[in-house]
Structures are given as structure tokens and as C-alpha cells.
Image (tube, helix red, strand yellow):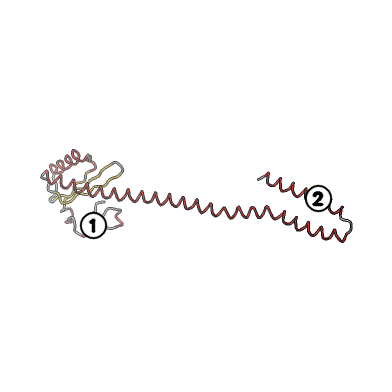
């Protein structure tokens, strides 16, 4: 940039030297007026040329900004899609694990109404609803089964009964609301 300005100033200085020399070579004042007019036009073109080149570059600036914006927007959309896919996969895995755990518990003779699984990073949490109020023996059997077969630690197991608060799975009063976070089971 400094070199361009230096070159431009050098051209202006040479122009003034040539203008002065030409004015001394013109024989009469009548012709000097025409030479000054013509050289003035040339001088204006020389002064405007750098501004015009900057304007040309300034036209390129929005194009490059637009290109960069589109690239960033594309990256953002890709990241959003990846997160959406991850959330959908996680939700599907939670539902499938809940169904598989329910079947596994029922095969082992444990009467279970419903099982809900939540994945939090690498941690699995399970909520299991039984038909009757669970005693310590039933809770122990369920927690042992979840730990042995599914790797869910006992402290991450919640055993509930379908009779807790006279609510059963599928009962509208147990479904909770959207304000209860992302879980609609009524478990908080």
C-alpha cells in the first residue's frame, strides 16, 4: 500500500515537471490556456485513478464477505444437523433400551409396567414402574438385573409403582407438562 502511494506521488511530481516544461515551450499565452486545460484534465484523471481502484476493491469486499458468511452459515447448519441427529439417535436409543429392559425384566419374572431410560453422556439412568408397591427384595432384584445385564448402577435406578399417588402409566395426570423439562413421565 505504501509503495502504491509512493508511486502515485512520484507520477504526480513527474507530471508537474512535464507541465512546467511544456508551458515554457509553448510560444504564446493563447496556446498556454489550451495546454493548461488539457493538462488539468489529465491531472484530474491521475488524481481519481487511485480512488477508482479503491472503489473497485470495495466492490470485491462485499463479495468476499458474502462468501465467508455463506461458509460460516454452512458450517453452522452442518453442526446443527449433527446435533439434531445426535439427539434423535440418543432419544431412539433411550426408547429402545427402555423396551429391551422391560422385556428382560419380564422374562426374569419381574412384573413391570414401564421402563424409561435417560442417557447423560456415558451414564445411564433408569426409572422402572412396577404393578405393585415394590418391597426391598423386589427393588434389589430389579437393581441387580439392571446392573448385571445393562451396566446401570444401583444409585442410577429409580423404582416406582403404578400406584404411587394413584397414578399409572398412561394416566393423563402422570404425563407432566413441557415446563417439567424434557421428560413427560411425571418423574422429576
Check the image and report above or below for 125 versus 43.
Answer: above
Which label was assigned to residue 24? none
The residue carrying pointer 2 sits among few (fewer than 14), some (14 to 19) or many (20 or more) residues within 10 Å by Cα, namely few
* Residue at the right extreme of this rendering: 28
Measuring 87% from the left and 53% from the top, which residue is drawn there? 25
Instruction: Count the numbered circles shown.
Output: 2
The residue carrying pointer 1 sits among few (fewer than 14), some (14 to 19) or many (20 or more) residues within 10 Å by Cα, namely some
- Secondary structure beneath dot 2 equals helix
Measuring 54% from the left and 54% from the top, which residue is drawn there? 63
Marks 1 and 2 sit apart, C-alpha to C-alpha, by 92 Å
Residue 100 image position (x, y, % from top left): 18, 46
Residue 10 image position (x, y, % from top left): 74, 46
- Asked whether 175 or 12 is in front, the reply is 12
- Asked whether 72 or 127 is in front, the reply is 72
Which label was assigned to residue 175? 1
Measuring 51% from the left and 54% from the top, which residue is drawn there? 66
- Asked whether 41 or 81 is in front, the reply is 41
Measuring 12% from the left and 45% from the top, which residue is drawn there? 107
Using the rendered view, name the quadrant where residue 38 is placed. Answer: bottom right
Report which residue position mark 2 lands on: 18
Drawn side of residue 177 relative to residue 145, left or right: right
Residue 188 image position (x, y, % from top left): 26, 51
Q: Which tag, 1 or 2, sits closer to the chain's start?
A: 2
- Secondary structure beneath dot 1 equals loop
Residue 31 image position (x, y, % from top left): 85, 60
Name the quarter where the N terminus is drawn. top right
Drawn side of residue 147 relative to residue 48, left or right: left
Drawn side of residue 10 relative to residue 156, left or right: right
Amino acid at each position: 500500500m505504501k509503495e502504491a502511494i509512493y508511486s502515485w506521488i512520484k507520477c504526480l511530481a513527474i507530471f508537474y515537471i512535464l507541465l512546467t516544461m511544456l508551458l515554457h515551450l509553448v510560444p504564446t499565452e493563447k496556446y498556454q490556456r489550451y495546454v493548461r486545460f488539457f493538462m488539468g484534465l489529465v491531472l484530474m484523471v491521475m488524481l481519481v485513478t487511485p480512488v477508482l481502484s479503491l472503489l473497485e476493491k470495495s466492490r470485491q469486499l462485499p463479495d468476499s464477505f458474502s462468501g465467508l458468511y455463506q461458509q460460516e452459515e454452512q458450517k453452522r447448519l452442518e453442526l446443527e444437523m449433527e446435533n439434531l441427529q445426535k439427539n434423535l439417535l440418543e432419544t431412539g436409543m433411550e426408547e429402545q433400551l427402555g423396551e429391551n429392559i422391560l422385556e428382560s425384566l419380564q422374562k426374569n419374572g419381574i412384573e413391570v409396567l414401564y421402563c424409561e431410560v435417560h442417557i447423560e453422556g456415558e451414564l445411564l439412568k433408569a426409572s422402572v414402574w412396577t404393578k405393585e408397591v415394590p418391597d426391598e427384595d423386589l427393588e434389589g432384584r430389579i437393581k441387580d438385573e439392571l446392573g448385571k445385564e445393562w451396566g446401570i448402577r444401583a444409585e442410577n435406578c429409580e423404582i416406582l409403582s403404578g400406584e404411587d399417588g394413584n397414578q399409572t402409566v398412561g394416566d393423563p395426570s402422570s404425563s407432566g407438562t413441557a415446563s417439567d423439562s424434557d421428560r413427560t413421565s411425571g418423574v422429576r
